[in-house]
Every structure is written in structure tokens, then in C-alpha cells.
Amino acid sequence: MTTASHTPLAFDGEQPLEFLAFKIGQEEYGIDIQSVQELRGYDAVTRIANAPEHVKGVTNLRGVIVPIVDLRIKFGQPEPTYDALTVVVVVNHGGRAVGMVVDAVSDVISVIQAECKPAPAMGQSIDTDYTLAIATLGERLLALLDVGALLHGLFSGEAAALAA
């Protein structure tokens, strides 16, 4: 597997960082709120020939062609459903918009450095190459994900041509 290097969490003393919390199956994850462009419902997509299974296709978002990646498939969840409650988190990464399909969005959380622990090398339902840290918020555990690592390699070949 080709891996991307992580962008480290940029804590400034005790100042918290904010993350958008979402669910995939029973697991809870978070991404840097600054990378989130918008939340929207799942719309029909145009498939891309020979795209990986987790790349559902592209959609037109106000004149911009946006690739749609289903994180549920990427993380090995059983066959996902697409209905009126399916959520797409549109992120801006490297100047490009990408839609990430998740089961549900819960809230925006503030995390301080003391609440973050390194992700264990084993026992995770996702590849730890995507995980910056595990935040412990009381009894709640949140895998903080690296958007850059998640989307590494997406903008090559046909997906890049359509998203440009």
C-alpha cells in the first residue's frame, strides 16, 4: 500500500482544535473542521470507468465537478445503503472539493492535546495510515483522520481529469 505522510495536529498550547464528528457503522471519526466545505445529502453520481470501488463517481456541485468517495466502502463496511439520510461531507483538500459519504454526522467537537493518544498499530477497523490520533472524550473515543492521507492518490488518472 502506498502511504501518505500525515499532517500533524497543530495544537497551540492548551488551545483546542475543532473536528467534525461523524459515524461509519458503529465507529466514530473526526476530521479537521477547517477542511469541511459543506454537508449535503447524497445525490445520484456519474460513474467513472475503472475507478476503485470506493470512488462512487462524480457529481456537479454548483458548476464544479466533485469526486464522491464512500468512506464506508473504503473502511470495509458491509454493503452500504443510499437514501435520503445518507450524508456527504464535502471537504476542500489542496484546492479541490471532494465529497466523502458517511452514515451520519453528529456534531463539532473541541479537542485539546491532552485528550489525544497515538493510534494503536493493530485492532483498528481502518488502516492506521489514515489516523492522526485517538481522542478520548470521557467514554467517547474518536479516531481523528488525516484528510490528506484518506484522499491520497485520488487525483490521478480519470478522476483527476474530471475533477480539474
Image (spheres, rainbow, N blue to C red):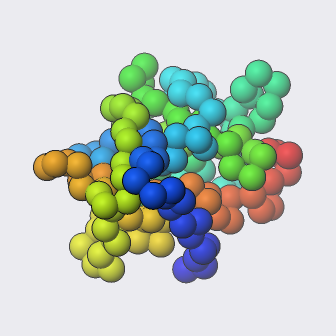
Query: Can you name the residue that lies furthest to the left here?
Result: 139
Q: Nearer the viewer, residue 32 or 124?
A: 32
- Residue 10 appears in which quarter of the rendering? bottom right
Q: Residue at x 45, y 58 (%)?
A: 13
Q: Is residue 24 in view from this perspective?
A: no
113 sits to left or right of 68: left
Q: How many marks?
A: 0
Q: Residue at x 75, y 58 (%)?
A: 155
Residue 27 at x, y percent in the picture: 27, 50
| Residue 35 versus residue 124 in the image, above or below | above
143 sits to left or right of 48: left
Residue 4 at x, y percent in the picture: 61, 73
| Residue 92 versus residue 45 in the image, above or below | below
- Residue 63 appears in which quarter of the rendering? top right
Q: Is residue 138 in view from this perspective?
A: yes
Residue 107 at x, y percent in the picture: 36, 31
Q: Nearer the viewer, residue 83 or 131?
A: 131
